[in-house]
Image (cartoon, coloured by chain):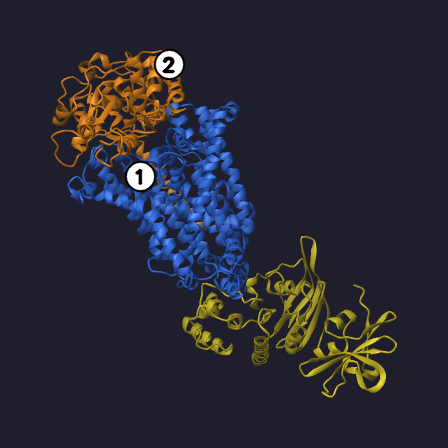
Chain colours: A orange, B yellow, C blue
């Protein structure tokens, strides 16, 4: 019995020791969400150039990761946070989470992305959430694919669509905001939702909507040919097809896209503030920016960053997506979600 | 000699042993006889050390065992329904105590063979205990208890769960074994026959006390009181002022005559029990080995051998 | 001598208490205090929406548990009582659904069910049965196998019909194990998350789902804390009742050695065995086979491309995917060791000591706690030296052990209680001091249950997702975390690699559980 106790103590001690070792300042910790990705080579390039090790902490989806950061505000789990999007911007800035820092690379970024003028958060990438459809399905059914929100009002089209719940899914929220940006505030968006609400299938997450219910995904074919997803899907489907394709199996309804910009910032109370600033610099450097499309499947914010061929061919960025001011989103998000829920789910 | 001296045990205020005392002579078998609930199992557990005593002493050859933990008492115990170790085979069960004593391996092996032969199970060493019959299991339990050559062997109704014929055979075997090994044995039972068959001495327990402890013959001749007499199976017990009179059934002689009528006749093995009703209304039981006994309803004469009648104390329980 | 005994007695209670106190009570209390302050959130608790969710949570868990017991009992019987070829494999295979990420199983279900049945309560119940049958088969079957069959044979010779024998002998005899399996299954269904989210769709929510949304999406920490407190209280009540039942049942039936207990099926048992195995093959085999099939279905026809991609760099994961196998095994092994020590000591304390009784309820609570709230609790409770454990590797097995330990306790405690105390007395009389008695009697007699518990604990640690995804470092993902990351990306390669990793996870589970079974099936192994 005593032996067991001693072993337990030894385990705890060893663990505590490794904990101390892990929190030394020879490294910089990037706190982010699950969708963050970086290639080994790019990571090595940063470590070589800055002399500090980069550790990445993925804390769930964008909402969960941000909320966890808010909980630990002032005693952060890392040095830099990446992954606040424009939907969450006002919540993030309200939490006194970040120290201001203007990286050098910001001068190469279009001002339309730079939504926090005090630079507690700086833009890193952008993308869009749109209606995406299955080309083959519309071809074999000899039907016209949708090109506007209103097309879903045509007989039968709503029944072809799967959308995500805005209360639980980031693309779901973006698509609801897109309809508000398109139809204007007031009752119009809800009239639209009431009209399509009975036909659309609502899932709680993107994963189920895209991989299971959508007919165009390469994995297991669902039955609905229209889904709310990302504007980079055509490129991703080709890139991950496992064989060469001349045409993407999916296409984007470009008029329905809602713009999403992702931001990063130096966490207040960072152990390695100097390393943190170097990391933010790096996130806006040509090297990292060039890697964004094929790792995270969104677009670099830095101007003149070359896009990979598969993006140039299948997923050019959406020129002027629908948008709402972060403050407007922050002030109305919860009320809009409640209205959406009563309109569509009940 | 094992001596139990005024031992008291209570569970949650309910007395189980109320000053029990007894002596078991070295190399002899003491049968502890009593009805269920009289405290005889508790007494056995107290001797083994499985039950701490509230007061009193337990002495073995002059050593005070009272505070000694179970595993250092050197006492053998055989439980009511064997309690063999299910995860060990026959040899593993018998060898248990020897392994605990760190005896050398070859000695253990030899001793196990010896014991298997002793208890009548040669060749069963590697059998799983679950595959044994009830009688065989008890033999293994006996072998296990004997393996360490205990100073005293305690047995708690070891034949209780066996059928009649097996019981008789095992009883014979036990008696031979006890005699051969010159064991000091305390044998707890509620069965008068077993107690008399095995015990050099018999101790009678009642409500947590030993009320009488003596040789079987003496017990039969002089039961301490009417309760003991009844418990031993004696009949024809009647009030006689502040004492009781016991007329042993063998002292009631039924012969041709005209004093009584035979009510019932019952043959039990070698003997025949007759119940006769005297003309004054009293009933008496009589036992005979004569196969020419009268039949029910016949009128008979009854004679009592007055020298055989016993006068005993009256128990005021 | 007496002092030593006392010290080990204190350690018995102290080690599990300290473990639970530090790694469960303290972080949860911290997050509750942050969320609730000093006020009682009566407005949240008595909100009609809350009441509706509580009601749904309770009834779906109740029905799921009943169905799981009904589906699991025949398999428990067959694997416990009958000797047939492949019995060990069946026993290991039933654990597979248990470790698969819910998202994978839910997706497999969606693919198999007709479209009209894809959403709602029916697929939820089916999935819960699919997941939790392992609990019934392992917990009840493990106990069943150790009951001495001669009792049943005796009843049979007395003319009792199989049905009557089941009602009057088997059910009462199995009560401790049934109580344990019922409680564990109920807790799993009560706190169900992934199954509800995917198969229920947006119209269904359990408390766990609601707490997750409140904590991560709405960020209403007060409501999230209030609901998880409510959930915890409900779980405590359920556990208290069930462990009371289990302890009262504490029957001491003769313990048999397993090889003796199982025998060739005869008479009506043969068709019953065939029916049971066919049912299992259909219910379990089909969804699993669909997964296996998918892992080989490359864009160029059947092939191993997805398995080869496990060894390739990928933008989806920070490490080469096969490293996840390594991390998973290391974490799960450590978690199993911790769970066996903590749960084993707690089981002894619960079974043999008055002072250990309260552990009985407390050790179960981590199963009923919201994973996300516990995760948040860890993050804010352990943020200051000397308790700055954030980002350490060992915190992952610790959390996994929190979830696995209840299984160890629920399997080992009834087994300990089931040991005839006279066996210990017999050993003591034969000269064995207390420590030796424990080693010679208790350890070998609970070795088999301990093996069953170890297998389950390992599987639980291997499959744990909710808390692991919260605490595992991204460069050290476990298999379920890696699978989840691949599923989050579009494209055939990502989906196919996820399927291949699922098959690897299944294989690892079957091997590990089978090995634990085999190692501990010899009764005299010690």
**Does residue A104 appear in the picture of this structure?**
yes
Camera-nearest residue between C524 and A277: C524
What's the residue at 46%, 39% (across, down)?
Answer: C61
Camera-nearest residue between A234 and B233: A234
Q: Chain of mark 2?
A: A
Q: Chain of mark 1?
A: C
Q: Which residue is mark 1?
A: C104
Answer above or below: position of C162 versus B178. above
Q: Residues within 10 Å of mark 1 (few under 14, many from 20)?
A: many
Tell me if label 1 and label 2 are in contact, CB under 8 Å. no
Under circle 1, the secondary element is helix
Q: Residues within 10 Å of mark 2 (few under 14, many from 20)?
A: few
Q: Which mark is residue A331?
A: 2
Q: Which mark is residue A335?
A: none
Q: In which quadrant will I find the C terminus of chain A?
A: top left
Camera-nearest residue between B140 and C202: C202
Under circle 2, the secondary element is helix
**Residue B316 spot, x, y in % from top left:** 81, 64
Q: Nearer the viewer, mark 1 or mark 2?
A: 1
Please indicate whether residue C114 sits to the left or right of residue B160 in the image. Answer: left
Please indicate whether residue A27 sits to the left or right of residue A45 in the image. Answer: right
């Amino acid at each position: 019995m005593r032996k067991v106790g001693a072993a337990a103590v030894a385990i705890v001690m060893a663990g505590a020791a490794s904990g101390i070792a892990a929190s030394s300042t020879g490294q910089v910790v990037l706190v982010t969400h699950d969708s963050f990705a970086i290639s080994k080579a790019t990571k090595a390039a940063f470590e070589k150039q800055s002399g500090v090790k980069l550790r990445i902490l993925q804390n769930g989806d964008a909402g969960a990761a941000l909320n966890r950061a808010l909980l630990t505000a002032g005693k952060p789990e890392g040095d830099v946070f990446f992954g606040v999007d424009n939907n969450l911007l006002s919540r993030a800035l309200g939490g006194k989470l970040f120290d201001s820092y203007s990286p050098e690379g910001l001068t190469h970024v279009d001002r339309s992305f730079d939504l926090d003028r005090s630079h507690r958060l700086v833009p890193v990438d952008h993308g869009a959430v749109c209606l995406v459809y299955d080309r083959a399905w519309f071809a074999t059914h000899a039907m016209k694919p949708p090109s506007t929100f209103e097309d879903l009002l045509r007989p039968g089209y709503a029944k072809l669509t799967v959308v995500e719940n805005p209360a639980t899914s980031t693309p779901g929220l973006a698509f609801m905001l897109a309809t508000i940006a398109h139809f204007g505030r007031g009752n119009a968006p809800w009239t639209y939702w009431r009209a399509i609400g009975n036909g659309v299938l609502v899932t709680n997450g993107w994963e189920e909507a895209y991989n299971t219910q959508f007919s165009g995904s390469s994995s297991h074919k669902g039955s609905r040919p229209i889904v709310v997803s990302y504007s980079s899907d055509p490129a991703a489907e080709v890139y991950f097809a496992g064989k060469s394709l001349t045409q993407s199996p999916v296409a984007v309804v470009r008029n329905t896209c809602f713009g999403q910009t992702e931001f990063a910032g130096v966490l207040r109370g960072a152990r390695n503030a100097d390393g943190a600033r170097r990391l933010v610099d790096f996130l806006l450097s040509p090297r990292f920016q060039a890697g964004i499309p094929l790792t995270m499947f969104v677009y670099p914010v830095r101007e003149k960053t070359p896009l990979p061929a598969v993006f140039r061919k299948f997923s050019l960025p959406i020129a002027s997506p629908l948008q709402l001011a972060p403050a407007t989103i922050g002030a109305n998000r919860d009320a809009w979600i409640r209205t959406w829920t009563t309109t569509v789910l009940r | 000699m094992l001596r139990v001296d005024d031992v008291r045990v209570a569970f949650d205020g309910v007395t189980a042993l109320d000053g029990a005392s007894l002596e078991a002579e070295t190399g002899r078998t003491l049968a502890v006889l009593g009805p269920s609930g009289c405290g005889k199992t508790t007494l056995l557990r107290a001797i083994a050390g499985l039950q701490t005593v509230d007061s009193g002493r337990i002495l073995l050859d002059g050593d005070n065992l009272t505070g000694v933990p179970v595993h250092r008492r050197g006492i053998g115990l055989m439980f009511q329904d064997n309690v063999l170790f299910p995860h060990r085979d026959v040899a593993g069960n018998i060898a248990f105590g020897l392994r605990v004593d760190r005896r050398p391996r070859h000695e253990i092996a030899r001793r196990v063979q010896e014991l298997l032969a002793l208890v009548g199970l040669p060749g069963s060493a590697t059998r799983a205990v679950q595959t044994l019959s009830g009688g065989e299991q008890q033999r293994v339990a006996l072998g296990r208890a004997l393996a360490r050559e205990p100073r005293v062997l305690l047995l708690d109704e070891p034949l209780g769960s066996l059928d009649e014929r097996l019981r008789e055979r095992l009883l014979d075997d036990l008696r031979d074994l006890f005699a051969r090994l010159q064991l000091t044995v305390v044998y707890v039972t509620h069965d008068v026959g077993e107690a008399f068959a095995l015990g050099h001495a018999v101790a009678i327990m009642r409500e947590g006390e030993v009320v009488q402890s003596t040789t079987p013959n003496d017990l039969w001749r002089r039961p301490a009181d009417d309760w003991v007499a009844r418990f031993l199976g004696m009949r024809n017990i009647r009030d006689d002022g502040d004492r009781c009179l016991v007329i042993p059934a063998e002292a009631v002689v039924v012969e041709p005559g005209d004093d009584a009528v035979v009510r019932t006749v019952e043959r039990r093995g070698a003997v025949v029990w007759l119940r006769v009703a005297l003309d004054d209304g009293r009933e008496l039981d009589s036992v005979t080995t004569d196969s020419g006994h009268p039949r029910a309803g016949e009128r008979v004469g009854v004679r009592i051998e007055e020298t055989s009648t016993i006068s005993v104390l009256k128990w005021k329980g | 001598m007496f002092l030593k005994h006392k010290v080990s007695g204190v350690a018995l209670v102290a080690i599990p208490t300290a473990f639970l106190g530090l790694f469960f009570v303290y972080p949860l209390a911290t997050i509750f205090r942050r969320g609730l302050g000093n006020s009682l959130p009566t407005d949240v608790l008595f909100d009609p929406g809350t009441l509706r969710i509580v009601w749904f949570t309770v009834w779906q868990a109740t029905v799921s548990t009943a169905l799981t017991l009904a589906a699991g009992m025949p398999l428990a019987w067959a694997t416990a009582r009958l000797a047939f070829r492949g019995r060990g494999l069946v026993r290991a295979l039933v654990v597979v659904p248990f470790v698969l990420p819910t998202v994978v199983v839910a997706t497999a279900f969606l693919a198999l069910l007709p479209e009209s049945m894809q959403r709602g309560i029916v697929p939820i119940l089916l999935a819960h049965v699919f997941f939790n049958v392992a609990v019934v088969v392992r917990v009840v079957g493990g106990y069943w196998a150790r009951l001495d069959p001669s009792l049943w044979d005796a009843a049979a010779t007395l003319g009792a019909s199989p049905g009557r024998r089941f009602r009057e002998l088997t059910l009462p005899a199995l009560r401790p194990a049934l109580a344990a399996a019922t409680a564990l299954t109920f807790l799993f269904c009560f706190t169900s998350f992934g199954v509800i989210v995917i198969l229920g769709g947006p119209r269904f929510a359990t408390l766990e789902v609601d707490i997750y949304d409140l904590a991560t999406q709405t960020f209403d920490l007060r409501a999230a804390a209030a609901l998880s407190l409510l959930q915890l209280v409900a779980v405590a009540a359920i556990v208290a009742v069930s462990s009371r039942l289990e302890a009262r049942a504490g029957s001491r039936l003769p313990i048999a050695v397993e090889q003796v207990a199982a025998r060739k099926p005869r008479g009506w048992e043969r068709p019953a065995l065939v029916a049971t195995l066919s049912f299992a093959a259909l219910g379990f085999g089909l969804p699993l086979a669909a997964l296996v099939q998918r892992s080989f279905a490359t864009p160029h026809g059947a092939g191993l491309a997805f398995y080869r991609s496990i060894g390739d760099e990928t933008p989806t994961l920070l490490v080469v995917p096969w490293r996840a196998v390594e991390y998973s095994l290391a974490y799960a092994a450590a978690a199993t060791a911790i769970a066996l020590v903590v749960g084993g000591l707690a089981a002894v304390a619960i079974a043999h000591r008055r002072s250990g009784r309260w552990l009985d309820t407390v050790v179960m609570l981590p199963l009923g706690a919201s994973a996300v709230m516990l995760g948040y609790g860890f993050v804010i409770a352990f943020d200051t030296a000397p308790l700055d454990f954030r980002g350490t590797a060992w915190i992952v097995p610790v959390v996994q052990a929190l979830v696995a330990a209840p299984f160890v306790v629920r399997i080992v405690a009834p087994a300990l209680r089931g040991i005839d105390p006279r066996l210990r007395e017999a050993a003591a009389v034969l000269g064995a001091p207390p420590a030796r008695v424990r080693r010679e009697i208790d350890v070998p007699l609970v070795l088999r249950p301990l093996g069953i518990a170890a297998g389950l604990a390992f599987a639980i640690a291997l499959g744990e997702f909710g808390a692991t995804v919260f605490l595992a470092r991204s460069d050290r993902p476990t298999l379920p975390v890696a699978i989840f990351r691949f599923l989050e990306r579009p494209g055939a390669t990502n989906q196919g690699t996820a399927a291949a990793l699922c098959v690897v996870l299944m294989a690892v589970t079957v091997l590990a559980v089978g090995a634990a079974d085999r190692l501990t099936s010899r009764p005299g192994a010690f």
